[in-house]
Amino acid sequence: MSTEDQDIIIELKGIHKRYLLKQALTGIDLRIRRGSIVGLLGPNGSGKSTLLKLIAGMIYPTSGSIRVNGREPDVRNKSQIAYLPEIDNLYGWMTVTETLNFISGFYADWQADKAAEMLQTMELEGKQKVRSLSKGMRARLKLIAALSRKVPLVLLDEPFSGIDPSSRAKIIRSILSEFQSDEQTIVLSTHSVKESEPMFDDVVFLQNGWIKKFDSAENLRAAYGCSLENLWEKVYA
Ligand SMILES: Nc1ncnc2c1ncn2[C@@H]1O[C@H](COP(=O)(O)OP(=O)(O)OP(=O)(O)O)[C@@H](O)[C@H]1O
């Protein structure tokens, strides 16, 4: 994929990330197109969360360079990036509405109308205590928190984890129908390849900390003559 520089929102060059005892990423070169929805796929431990945290500016690479909108990411990028972490970072003693009000206080770009609308789509009760929500309901609340922000870049780490397959498909359809490619780019890691497939413009297959394949979903399907879900089996066989 060759693309002009202004069309690139994220650029990683020669990224290596080593934790104390573990080399998590090895020589990642990646350019993500503005306005695309990009799927980060790979088995457990392949480096998806590490890559998202680096892009979010939450951790730093051991070597290599990262640019998000032309700038090295750090905590100041919070105004540009909505990040949904894999871990559960919600307070159990708050209600759903209190949680969203609390989060909204941190961000000038918060869209209260969108949050209210998503509450309906996600079928959550505002009065319910977070501690009484199921895993899938908490995942829905985290999604509302990330997608209610008006930011150029949204990073979602395993956003559908715990959500049942038919609800997952419904939520994905609603994300797609709301998505405005002239305003936003979404990068998400997921193991739910089957349901997520219709979302993806581009797909990164990670393995052991390096990129095994990166191309548009369309090119990959055409080149291998199969769905991304089936391609997963071929890539990681
Ligand atoms: N804080 C950390 N300290 C040490 N090693 C870590 C740390 N975080 C991740 N790792 C290691 O780095 C590698 C990549 O982990 P990462 O969480 O990025 O993978 P992942 O693809 O997101 O996995 P999963 O699908 O299980 O969420 C793994 O071997 C993991 O054990």
Image: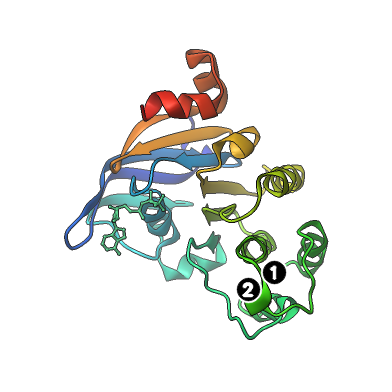
The residue positioned 40% from the left and 62% from the top of the image is 57
- Give the residue type that dot 1 points to: Trp
Task: Give the x, y percent position of residue 191.
Answer: 50, 43
Element on which disc 2 rests? loop
Q: Quarter of the picture for ligand 1?
A: bottom left
Task: Give 71 or 140, whichever is nearer the viewer.
Answer: 140
- The residue beneath circle 1 is 110
Task: Give the x, y percent position of residue 127.
Answer: 79, 79
The correct choice, above or below, for 33 with respect to 81 in the image is: above
Distance from label 2 to label 1 (Cα)?
Answer: 6 Å
Q: Is residue 1 visible?
A: no
Q: Specify whether 2 is left or right of 186.
A: left
Q: Splitting the image into 4 quarters, where does residue 53 fall?
A: bottom left
Q: Which class describes the residues within 10 Å of circle 2: few (<14), some (14-19), or many (20+)?
A: some
Element on which disc 1 rests? loop
- Give the residue type that dot 2 points to: Tyr
Task: Give 77 or 161, whichever is nearer the viewer.
Answer: 161
Task: Give the x, y percent position of residue 134.
Answer: 64, 67
The residue positioned 67% from the left and 66% from the top of the image is 141
